[in-house]
Image (cartoon, coloured by chain):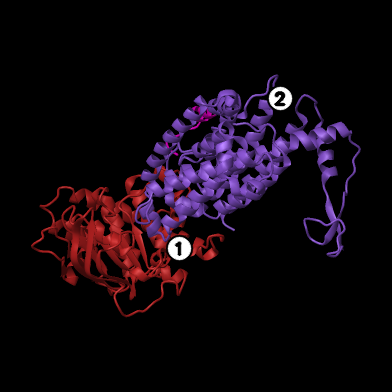
Chain colours: A red, B purple
Amino acid sequence: MSSDPGTGSAVDPGRTGGGCDGPLIAVRDLVVSRGGERVLDGVSLRVDRGELVGLVGPNGAGKTTLVSACNGTLAPDAGVIELNGRDLTTLSHRETARVVATVPQETNTAFEFSVEAVVEMGRTAYVSRFGTTTAADREAVRRAMERAEVAEFADRSVTTLSGGERQRVLLARALAAGTPALLLDEPTASLDINHQLRTLELVRAAVDGGKAALAAIHDLDLAARVCDRLAFVNDDPAVGSPMVTALRDGQRGRSLGGTAGGGDRVDADGDSGDGSDDRDDGGSDHAGADDGDDDRAGDNDGGDGDRAPEPDR
Amino acid sequence: MSHEWRRAAAYSAVLAAATAVVVTVSAGIGPVAIPAGTVVAVVANAVAVPASVEWVGAAGGPATAGLPLRVGFTHPFSFPVSGTHEAIVMRVRLPRILLATFVGVALAAAGTVMQGFFRNPMADPGIIGVSSGAAVGAVAWIVAPSALVALLGPVRPLLADGVGLQIAAFCGALAAGFGVYLIASRDGRTPVATLLLAGVAVQTFLGAVVSYLLLHSGESIRRVTYWLMGHLSGANWGEVAAAALVVPPLTVALFAYARDLNVLLLGERDAVALGVNAERSKRVLLAVSSVLTGAAVAVSGVIGFVGLIVPHGVRLVVGPDHRVLLPTSALAGGSFLVAADTVARAGVAELPVGIVTAAAGAPFFLYLLRTREVYSL
């Protein structure tokens, strides 16, 4: 698992295909209204391969709206969204789902589906109506569950999981789709800081493996730690379009590790291995900001311990 | 073959066998008790294998189904059975039992779809007004046949005797279902919540229409009440053939949407993001399950509870995955209704089967609720 960072492309080469040059997600002059009110007005944004772009801004500013427009669940009034160079409006739901996979903020988990069944739903766009899942589908599901660290409770009902575990199941579902791009709609909103960090580290690992990701993240501090760039979505009409800010590479590298040894091919284990640097840095950078930092460091350590044996599998 | 399909196949095989047993036993029960072995022998004797096809030309001769062919059948079995037993099984009991099977399959499959579709444990096959529409059609036919006959004027000669009621009920069902769908749709979208509320409102309205017709039913009130309670008496091979043409193909069509239904359970936005054309899947699921329900109600009246309780009971056992739940629920519905109808006709005075399904189904369901931990659908 750790030897190959690109889960999706490794499992089904060609399915993630398309042009390799342009941005995976390109948004130009997007206008979206909801309930008669303009939520997004002239938004432009691009997300490239191997890039994690954080969408930050106050509640109600339109982060979720932008994510929903990008996966085709919300039709824009004006503007263009291109996924892997193709206009979203020309793609079927199925084709769209083969380019972008979405981790929702929450999902209806009142049904007693097993974790594996939910992750397998990530393959919906590949399974024909009368067909069954193939060996490639099952392999993608297995690897996604491992990467999102939910394999150990594959047979449990999703209703029995904690919020953090459930969020990782939804991440696994998105990874199972093997898409080149990920969309995350406040994936950490309901989680405690330890689980927030853990979830985003997994996203970071997927991005370092070659995916592009656009993540709405409420917590600015957290977003700055894991993202390559941040896009501010502002509900102030005077500002209008979001301001995209490139973070200093060093800042992101320092906060989640991985730059020391050759930054562009960092897998999950590499990240967590360097996680100790992260904790130290985090402690010094944000010492005054949050008393919980020490707890987080401790919990994070525990998480690393859990993951240590993975390469042996 | 994936794990779920294997589970579905295993459960279905067991339930199909159970259905066969229930059908056989049921065919032996009645005023004249017939041993199961005799029932099997009678059915085996009726098996006909087309053995020869003879060209008789356009000139005439005894043709088969309008074609200039004469098909010769051989009966591979000829067990010695009494003519009385043969007549009872083949003419009286078997049509009714097979009709019960098809109606049970249709109601349970449609109920399963509606519960998943609406993410609502109280949804039943008639939730979007299909049963109420059928009731209006059937009651209007019974109470004021002359008005409907006039309405059907041009097609009247095409209808065989005695199927007017079924046709009226089926048309009423489809009209109500389609009407609710149109009311709830806007800009090509059909929100599930709107559909549910529109269905409830239309059901209430159609209920008022039925009540009004009942007031004016005069002599025929007994017949109307009997129909409204749901019954399978008087079933004939014609109805069985019609049900056989409608129910199995449409039920299998629903199986093809089992995966979509699973994904829809997570919510429509999730489903769309996962690549499901949610609006189209919803339309297909609604249309197919409405036709199934309409067909079932048309031949049997409003048999309550089968479409509500059978999917629930089966879900408690096999889980929420529709790839497993739909086929098992359909088969369980078939055997449940055959068993209930056997009870209904075996007593001293024959009861409408709707009474039996409700009276037996509700306590069984409460038992399941109490013995299994049920927190959700």
Which residue is label 1 attached to? Answer: A125
Q: Image quadrant for the N terminus of chain A?
A: bottom left
Per the image, label 2 sits on a secondary structure element best described as helix
Tell whether label 1 touches label 2 (CB within 8 Å): no
Q: Left of B241 or right of it: where is B366?
A: left
Disc 2 crowd, CA 10 A, few/some/many (<14, 14-19, 20+) = some
The chain ID associated with circle 2 is: B
Q: Nearer the viewer, residue B53 or B111?
A: B53
Give the residues drawn in magenta, as a range: B365-377
Three-letter residue code for mark 2: Ala
Q: CA distance from mark 2 to mark 1?
A: 51 Å
Q: Which of the labelled discs sits on residue B346, or is there none?
A: 2
Residue drawn 70% across and 42% down?
B17
Disc 1 crowd, CA 10 A, few/some/many (<14, 14-19, 20+) = some
Q: Nearer the viewer, residue B163 or A123?
A: B163
Residue A230, percent from left and from top: 19, 65
The quadrant holding residue A88 is bottom left
